[in-house]
Image (cartoon, rainbow, N blue to C red):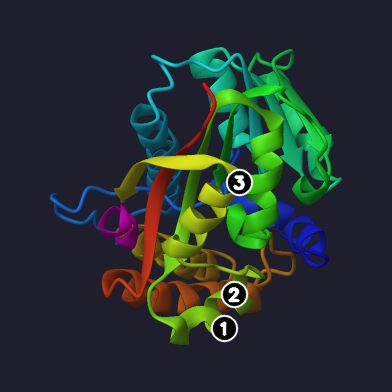
Amino acid sequence: MGQVPLYYSAKTAAIVHKYGPGPRIHFHVGLFDPAHQPPNTTVAQHVIRRRLVASQEAMVKRAAQLWDVAGDRPDELLDVGCGLGGGSILWAQDHGASVTALTIAADHAPLIADLARQAGVGGLVTPVVGDVHELTSARRYDAAVAFESSGYMDRERLFQVMAKALKPGGWFGVQEHFLRRPEWTEFIDGYYHTRLGTLTEYIAAARAAGFDLEQDEDVTDEVTEFWVQSMAWSTLEIDRTAGADSVPVPRERLVESALTHGKFFRVWRDRSIETRILLFRLRGA
């Protein structure tokens, strides 16, 4: 994970610019209902941004529903690889959880704390800088979540650490992308600095650490449109900043993003990659 902190630190301003202003800022895909007509992309850029943020919120809320967070509310929750803390703030605001927001990017911690204060949950969200592989907490948390962060981690070690950190019967919720066609591995891992795996790999690592899989929701079809909307935002940003001396996101980065997300649309549409929401339960309740 050596390059991951640098990767995220370098992207902070771009993430805030695209998905902000917050206080709940997410850096993961979102959900669009495939049963409805895809939203028009020939609209103002702020409309696209609003859609993207709403879709990201929909992803977290869908997970909360699937995991029955309202009925099995965790008092202490660990948000593994929390990004800019959007999910951490949501868990605190909507469910009253006391959240440890674990980030590997040191410069994100004060930003997460500030956003949590803006949201009125500064006392419930505690940013912690650290590598989850080295976490030593024992039987502290009722639940843990990882939204598109487990792809950066050693899965066997991750589940071992979660098994130790959770109380008996605690649950670990994962939203992640899973490989179905290995020829896309190098392209996607190279772009995001990840190491995506297969669903089979996750289940095996979880079982070895003492977890059972309780929920497996395939949301791939609902994610596909996210890439179209994201691509539209990038092309609108290229047009908006044309000729400007100073830009929030470098033009070459925007071009790369638009082209790559166009490929991602095809990859997800063809289901070469699947996005799933999983719930693992630690044995020993």
Residues marked 1 and 2 touching at CB (< 8 Å): yes
What are the residue bounds of the magenta stretch?
Answer: 219-224
Label 3 CA crowd tier, 10 Å (few <14, some 14–19, many 20+): many
Tell me if I can see residue 82 in this picture: yes
126 displayed left or right of 66: right
Bin the neighbour count of mark 1 within 10 Å (Cα to Cα): few under 14, some 14-19, many 20 and up.
few
Vertical side of 263 occupied by 51: above or below: above
The residue sitting at 43% across, 63% down in the picture is: 200
Magenta-colored segment: predominant secondary structure = helix
Separation of residues labelled 3 and 2 (CA atoms): 26 Å
Name the residue carrying label 3.
209
Instruction: Name the residue beneath numbered marker 1.
Output: 186
Which residue is under mark 2?
189
- Identify the residue shown where x is 61% and y is 30%: 88
Q: Is residue 239 above or below residue 134?
A: below
Cα distance between the residues tagged 1 and 3: 28 Å
Does residue 272 lie above or below 204 as drawn? below
